[in-house]
Amino acid sequence: QDAITGTVMDADNQPLPGANILVEGTNRYAVTDFDGNFSIEASSGEVLQISYVGFRTRNVTIGNEQTLTVMLEEDTSELDEVVVVGYGVQKKSDITGAVASVKAEDIVKQPALTAVQSIQGKVAGVNIVSSDAPGSTPTVMVRGIGTAEGGREPFYVVDGQPTQDIRSINPSDIESIDFLKGASYANIYGIRAANGVILITTKKGKKGKAKINVDSFYGVRSTLNRVDMANASQYITYFNEESASLGGFMLSEDQQFNTDWYDELLQLGSISSNSLSISGAGEAIDYFFSYNFYEEEGILKDNKYSRGTIRNNNTYHLFDDKFRITQNINITYTNEAPKPFSAFNNAYRQSPLVPVYYDNGRFGQSFVNQTTGVVGYRSQAGESVGRLYPHGNPVADVYYQDQDINTTTLQGQITAELDITDKITATGRFGATKFYSKNNNYNPIRERWLNADPRRTLEQFEAGRVPDEEDGTISTEFANNSYRVIDEEFFRWNLEGFVTYNDSFDKHNLSATLGLSRENYGGREKMEALAYDVYEEKRLRSLGRRTSAFFDNTVEQEFNQSTNLQSYFARVEYDFDKKYFVRAVLRRDGTSDFITGDNYFENFPAVSLGWTISKESFLEKVSFLNHLKLFAGWGKLGNANVPINIQQIKTNAGSGNQNYVFGPTQSLIFGSSFGSPVVPLRWEVTEEWEAGFDFELFDRRLTGTLDYYNRKNTNTIVLVKNILNSAAEDDFRAHAAEVTNTGFEALLSWRDNISDDFSYNLSVNFSTNKNRVQNVPTGYDGATGGSLSNGQITKRLKDGEPLFAWWMYEADGIWQNQEEIDNNPSVGGAAPGHLRYKDQNGDGVIDDRDKKYFGSYIPTFNYGVNIGIQYKKFDLSIDGFGLGGNKVYNGLANTRLGGENVTAETFKNRWTGEGSTNSHPGAYRDALPSSYWLEDGDFFRINNITVGYAFEDLSFFNRVRFYVTAQNPFMFTRYSGFTPELNRSGDNEYGNPVGTTGMELSAYPTTRTFIFGVNLQL
Amino acid sequence: CDDFVKEVEIVDPTAEESGEIFEPVQFVTGVYGRHTDFAFAFSYLGITEIISDNADKGSSPTDTGTDKHLLDGLEHNASTPSIRAMWTQWYKTIGRASLAIEYTEEYEMTNESLRARLIGECKFLRALNYFWLVRSFGEVTLQHVDLVERAPVSEVYAFIEQDLKEAIEVLPLKSEYASSDLGRATQGAAQSLLAKVYLYQEKWQEAADMAQEVINSGEYGLEEDYATLWRASTENGRESVFEIQARGDIIAHGVQQYSQTQGASGPNGWGWGFNTPSEDLLNAFNEEGDTIRRDATIIFRGETLWDGRQVDPAVQNAMYNEKAYSSANAGNNDTDKNIRVIRFAEVLLIRAEALNELGRSSEAIIPLNDVRDRVNLGAVSTTDQGELRMLIWKERRLELAMEHDRWFDIIRTGQAGDVMRAHGKPFIDGKHELFPIPNDQRIQTPDMTQNPQW
């Protein structure tokens, strides 16, 4: 027998004090000291059994060595993990609803601005639609979408503090994200929970010595799915075919330019991030400090977004840890230089015959000599110059946009927890957020004016700058420039207190929570000022300092009333022998925004049940079954972020149609009119029930969850069109529909260690969603949406269809000749080569009644696949994400004024005369919305492939890992545009079903990114 | 604790409780104001002139003006936006008038005659809009009765007549108004409109009598020079019975974009170039030798206008509507263009037509010749009822060309089918006399009936 010495460590090379070492078959044992060291008498050939609570026990056979280093792995059952559920935590094994968790390592694997974007495809039932535009926020749909006019954002709570903008949180500060998908858990957040609740927990210092982490990466990005446009000669052919049908002029074959506008517009973007964190814990204090700087430049030149975050989370353990104070501070500052995404649209339409620049240095525009048919602005006497179409030069659009947005967000929170007895803990918390934003927008009006037409001269511009003789004014068209400054700030705070009681007797376990909270949010102050003729140099730009006094400065100020929210909540969790679970929650919310009679308040109850069937005696002998629990629940949620009807009497200070002119000198007299009847509105209420089961099989290698949900917004607010022949003038909002979302969610995960050197895991998730509008009163379902900005709409609200389903003509071939048109119903202006539309009602006329519903942009299923492999010091992970069952609208291809460029594909497929094709329209066609432009939105994307290699135990560093990542290397889609992920509606509106969500008009293309990164640990 | 939510004041959902005081006159102004809506500058052109033989769509072949090409080609249907726009526009104006009447009746005010006058103005405007509705759509819903059930044409006319008669009772004469009230509905306006309403119902005696009342009032006469009729100089002049008022000075306010939509387009143009006088109209002037009215109605490509403006020879269309031209404001969004809704010349023509139908042809030619005399056309002497009827109808066309009357006139007189088919348009008898009830209306009120053959 020799004295064997050794050290017991965890997977992160942290020593484990207090681990037990037993020589098998003897009573010799030892316990590790504070540094994880032990010493024990043992002989060669004997077996040491090393165990530690929460870790897998390991057996080591003694060989010849005298010293051992033993690494213990954490016991990987997820069931013992705690899940944050709002005002408390619960062990995963005790959860009786659909709660999904994502851990830090899954978040940092996919580098992105927000953590939510990183976990796309990883959570069943949570559909994350991203945009690759710098600084953009992804759209999150938890179990479909249930509201038309109300807020669609999930409710983000960071360490207990409601947080408005998820971009303020650095992803590498996050320890875990928990999704309260089901109503029985989400309802603890009452009137803000209807779109799902996302709880984010940031990192804290852990026992042991100080850890320093450095994470850096750099990447480049380019367009993933670029569309080929027609080249110069194809364009000429197409233009001339269209023009011939209209009796217009012909383009000459002899042209100067062949511009590829996307080559000119797009560049290689970049992304980089550097973070540093220091964390640890001493006797009475845990500390975590981090700094991150993230920077992105998009595929449009100078389209930049950068963000710095500083976080400090400290916990002070006082009075033998009976009193704990946690302080969180997060400071975020961002800088953004936006560029107009309409450039994507203009690049699509711009003719290849137009140059980026003319030889006189001006930007190319769509001028054409209509006499010679040569594209350009030059002409001889008697020749006329016109334009091919009114679209501008996209490179100029990007060049002239000169805007800077700076924001600062300060978030702070303090939490105090006191253990009053062993069983009762009281918690108090105060948090506050202050947000500042400064938006400076410089518009070089003179440069734009000169570049809109290469023939314009500075003298002409100066001639416009002469004051009008009568009123002494100059049109702002002839200002040298304008400078707009918008300052905005808001403040919000939350204060809450709750008491938790925990008790166990015999086999009964009981936990109860009772609390109240107050919040104030939504108060906002905005100041907007506009000046003309300021100094051009950036550093001299100022509202007060101007180069002329022709124009007055304008200043507008706006205040928003804040909202007070008062809430009470109570929760009881009980189980018998960890077998039978009952959980009941009651939330009572009142907000200053709504009052019905004298009542501001409404109650939101929820109840759920669980049964761990695997603990029953009849299943205990089934050896492959480690865990099986059934659960079912019901709950009620609210959405208070809804618009309200206000203002019944309308007036207008300008040329509004309330006003009129009377008298010999024609004075403008201000009048008024009644708008629409004010229908009182309240928050929307969603009810949901769900049922499912969790399981663990085969030594916990296979784990999974399967559940069903049925969620119904019982009083959806709809913008109701005023009845045309009524006195009401405005559309008004009313509770006028129900929206249901039903579906299944499944998650399956397999993990195994083949040997000490080789382990792998594979997980797949799949979810379905069926979205329906129901119970719309007659006359209330006329609301339309999906405007193409040319007077045409593509969506309509209809009972029995998905929310704002596609609504348009059904394309039914191509008109081959005039005779066909004369003998069949057609839309006015139909001509050979145009799309033919189906007369659905057979009345011989094509009108709105022949429009049909074609499903929705909302996917009916989505899925994710995640593979991880660890071999020796290599790690590999591959993630894929897909969705389908939806339709997206190619508005880029559809909308057309005439004369613009088309894709090479459109050119190739076009109708060229009778009998050429019955599927694709000719160069002369209409621009009406129809099913021809509606395409399958299905796609599957490999969104991440990462290969890493780690060096361990280097002299200075504990661990150094290098990795390369390819984001979105491949996408499989049949969609003909740039991206089927279309979450934007307007500039800042994400996922609005009434708007252009699901339509490609000027969407940011999906990008492919290659990243090189390093993680250092010391 | 619950009081926390009460600390923040709720945004008051009803403005009536906002403490701001609204006088009845403001709501009456709002009724007038509704007539300055953009609908009258574009949709209205489509369904009054472009659709008729007087005018073509204009602008470029590819620029459809949303649906103006459909109206021009008589290819419109229940989904045509211009039809829906006017249907809605007229009903919303009627709504404003009724709400203003209600507000005025209930409002505490000491000046009872002002109260009566304001109500009278609203009734005149309400009648005007119902008249526009009934002649366009036939049976229409009466807003105060029902939103689904369409009332028979006779009932709609009865309601119009009642409003006008009540208005005539209380409205002052044009000369009785204070000068600051210039532009308000007058007794003469209500009488003139009533005469026209009678004409449409072929109540010849009433029409003749009512027109005579206007003539006898001594408030009106013909302008000397027809060419000045639609210019700023004759606004609210002696011939003016009712006009939509407009100002061009900042803050400009008129029928939004009325001059712009109809201004010449192309090189040195000032507008969009819609609603261009047709070849057919030009021929009608030329056949009559009616150069004064021709040149006052039509801007020709390349001509020099009365105010010295050179119309570029390269403008897009050969002719434009001169009556929409604003000299001071050209193609601005809002111009000084007052739109003449009823002129005294029309009252004379109503009188002439009614008398002729009553068999009093020799009396009928007197007012007819008053109108012709002004534009140096020879006096009509025929007393043959049939021949005179045709001459009066032709006179209406030339006198009121581009004044939004032609389409309804040819339908009223039963000429529409022949005229339009001769003009090369696929007019279907029994169908095209009325516009279809807009589809969007019937989606909201599915039980509302549609007009025949639509």
Image (spheres, rainbow, N blue to C red):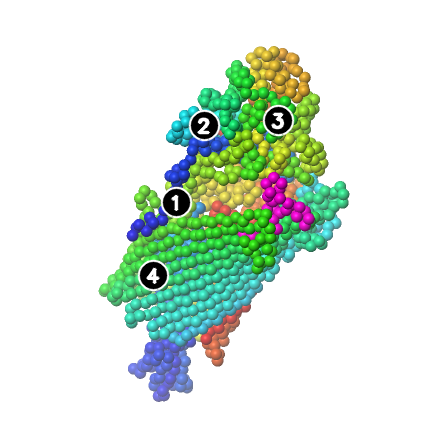
The percent coordinates of residue A483 (x first, y second) are 56, 52
User: What type is the residue that disc 3 sits on?
Assistant: Leu
Instruction: State the residue position of label 2.
Output: B118
- Disc 4 and disc 3 on one polypeptide chain: no
- Give the magenta range: A458-484
Helix, strand or loop at label 2? It is helix
User: What type is the residue that disc 4 sits on?
Assistant: Arg
Would residue A40 be found to the left or right of residue A298 on screen? left
- Disc 1 and disc 3 on one polypeptide chain: yes
Q: Are marks 4 and 1 in contact (CB under 8 Å)?
A: no
Helix, strand or loop at label 3? It is loop
Camera-nearest label, 2 or 4? 2
Helix, strand or loop at label 4? It is strand
- Disc 2 and disc 1 on one polypeptide chain: yes
Measured Cα–Cα span from mark 2 to mark 4: 63 Å
Q: Residues within 10 Å of mark 1 (few under 14, many from 20)?
A: some
Q: Residue at x 72, y 45 (%)?
A: A369
Measured Cα–Cα span from mark 4 to mark 1: 30 Å
